[in-house]
């Protein structure tokens, strides 16, 4: 396996490594030990993706960023191309590692991901987009909210989640898609946010699962009628 940002990873023995330790990772070539003590943080905002590399003391040793364009193909619509999201993240990470110095990627022990909340990223079973991502600034679902206000849906959403939907929340966007783009929901395998990329539960493609630690997805799902 080869990671475009961090270099060759084949033959790495990760046995016995704990997250709280500054671990050394042994690579299969005799006598080659690489110390991994750096933390890479990546934040995908609405318009800019930022990457910062920190050493074991919390000092920033490298920074990079990339601008991500937004699209408004119709009034109230705010979208982004998911392939552009990936490319911009790669550019930000590459610039960050380049600033930190040669071969810095080999010293990265942990990668932390963050992103804008709410919105909706619909992907198929291979993780490919089935439509452009909808970001939280989008207000196309406002008519859905107008129907929900004053109904049991509104009060039940507040009871279950402690808040009510807004136009850019997944619950409202799911309802809008069901009405106007039902084919998207039929084709989509996973509905994600910028903070919840698919992750694999095993090394096998057929066993791949999506997972999310993003609380906005859980809260919004509780609102959806």
Image: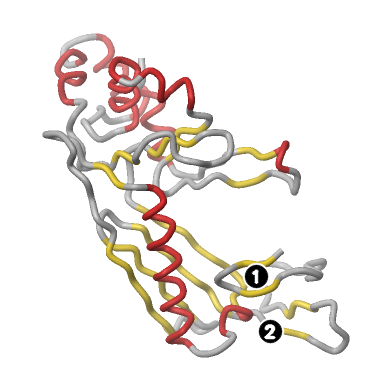
Query: Where is residue 23 drawn, in percent x and y?
Result: 71, 77
Residue at the image position 38 percent from the left and 63 percent from the top: 88
Residue at the image position 28 percent from the left and 25 percent from the top: 172
**How would you rate the neighbour count of disc 1 (Cα within 10 Å): few for under 14, some for 14-19, many for 20 or more?**
few
Q: Closer to the camera, 129 or 217?
A: 129
Task: Tell me: residue 28, above or below residue 182.
Answer: below
Left or right: 80, with 187 as reference point = left
Query: Where is residue 77 drawn, in percent x and y?
Result: 19, 36
Which mark identifies residue 35?
A: 2
Q: CA distance from mark 2 to mark 1?
A: 14 Å
Q: Please report whichever mark, 2 or 1, sits nearer to the chain's N-terminal start.
A: 1
Residue at the image position 41 percent from the left and 57 percent from the top: 114
Which residue is identified by label 1? 20
Q: Quadrant of residue 138?
A: top left
Query: Where is residue 36 drawn, in percent x and y?
Result: 65, 79
Left or right: 92, with 39 as reference point = left
Q: Quadrant of the C terminus?
A: top left
**How would you rate the neighbour count of disc 2 (Cα within 10 Å): few for under 14, some for 14-19, many for 20 or more?**
some
Q: Quadrant of residue 219?
A: top left
């Amino acid at each position: 396996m080869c990671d475009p940002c961090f270099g060759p990873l084949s033959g790495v023995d990760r046995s016995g490594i704990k997250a709280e330790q500054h671990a050394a990772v042994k690579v299969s070539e005799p006598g080659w030990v690489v110390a991994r003590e750096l933390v890479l943080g990546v934040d995908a905002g609405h318009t800019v993706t930022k990457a910062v590399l920190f050493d074991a003391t919390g000092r920033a040793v490298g920074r990079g960023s990339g601008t991500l364009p937004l699209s408004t193909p119709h009034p109230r619509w705010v979208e982004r191309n998911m392939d552009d999201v990936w490319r911009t993240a790669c550019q930000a990470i590459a610039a960050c590692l380049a600033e930190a110095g040669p071969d810095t990627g080999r010293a990265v022990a942990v990668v932390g991901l963050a992103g804008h909340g709410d919105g909706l990223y619909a992907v198929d079973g291979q993780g490919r987009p089935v439509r452009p991502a909808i970001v939280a600034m989008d207000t196309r679902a406002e008519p859905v909210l107008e129907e929900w206000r004053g109904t049991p849906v509104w009060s039940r959403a507040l009871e279950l989640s402690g808040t009510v939907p807004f136009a850019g929340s997944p619950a409202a966007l799911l309802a809008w898609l069901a009405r106007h783009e039902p084919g998207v929901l039929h084709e989509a395998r996973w509905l994600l946010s910028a903070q919840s990329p698919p992750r694999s539960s095993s090394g096998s493609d057929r066993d791949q699962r999506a997972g999310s630690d993003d609380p906005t997805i859980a809260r919004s799902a509780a609102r959806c009628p």
